[in-house]
Amino acid sequence: MMRQMSRRGKFITFEGLDGTGKSTQMRRLAAALRKSGHEVVETREPGGTATGEKIRKVLLDSETSALAPLAEMALMFASRAQHIAEVIEPALAAGSIVLCDRFTDSTEAYQGGGRKLGSPPVRELHRVLCGDLQPDLTILLEANPHVSVSRARKRNRRASRAGARGHDESRFEQETRAFFMRVRESYMAIAKREPGRVVIVDARGTPGQTHERIVEVVRKKLRI
Ligand code: TMP
């Protein structure tokens, strides 16, 4: 009897500024893919594992003050290395589609661009700590940066008032407009450098319109 080779899954990441609707879009794509019979794993960074979620708390809590940019970058990669080993690689090996809310492009945009650490150290750390794992497709959601960031700020204010998980996640949203402009510029530079992997999706319409665009991209690029 011929043994069928199990096929490696697909790795799709969602990127963009805070408040562009990444999480909503990821959930909708997951639902659509499951409906058509695919095995889907939804995950996020920083986080995605028990250890990663602890690291996330340190990174996003506004009580974490004066974190050095290099320490911040190291923690992002610590969370990621654990995430790859514990969740992403096993799921891909099992043939699943992995949808991940942020990945190394976020580090290049936020720490490389926003914190001005530059792209080379981020790419080098990715090579050393993440085995240079590349997504098969990255969906970069693009909307008006001022609108998105103020949406994210409002959401976090609501969550911290409600005492959602006993801590807030607003450390990044407190950054300046100039910071987010640098983040956006870095994202654009990544998209330009790797047009085969990164697809910019217009997220200014309704969530339904954005979802349709994403489904089309996934169908065309990955034939799923
Ligand atoms: P989010 O889960 O709400 O998108 O929040 C994560 C925050 O962390 C967001 O402001 C972007 C930031 N971040 C980085 O600065 N670098 C990274 O590598 C990742 C994954 C996230």
Image: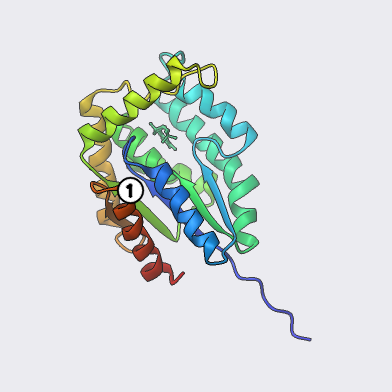
| SS at circle 1 | helix
Within 10 Å of the Cα at label 1, are there few (<14), some (14-19), or many (20+) other Cα atoms? some
Q: In the rendered view, does 68 fall on the left or right side of 20?
A: right
User: Which quadrant, please, contains the N terminus?
Assistant: bottom right
For the point 50% across and 37% down, the residue is: 77
Q: Quadrant of residue 183?
A: top left
Residue 134 appearing in the image: no
Q: Which residue type carries mark 1?
A: Pro
Residue at the extreme right of the image, as rendered: 1
For the point 48% across and 34% down, the residue is: 76
Q: In the rendered view, does 85 fall on the left or right side of 74?
A: right
Q: In the rendered view, does 165 fall on the left or right side of 149?
A: right
Q: Nearer the viewer, residue 217 or 68?
A: 217
- Is residue 85 shown above or below 172? below
Q: Quadrant of residue 175?
A: top left
Q: In the rendered view, does 99 fall on the left or right side of 14?
A: right
Q: Position of residue 169 (x, y in %)?
A: 44, 23
For the point 25% across and 28% down, the residue is: 179
Residue at the extreme bottom of the image, as rendered: 1
Q: Quadrant of residue 111?
A: top left
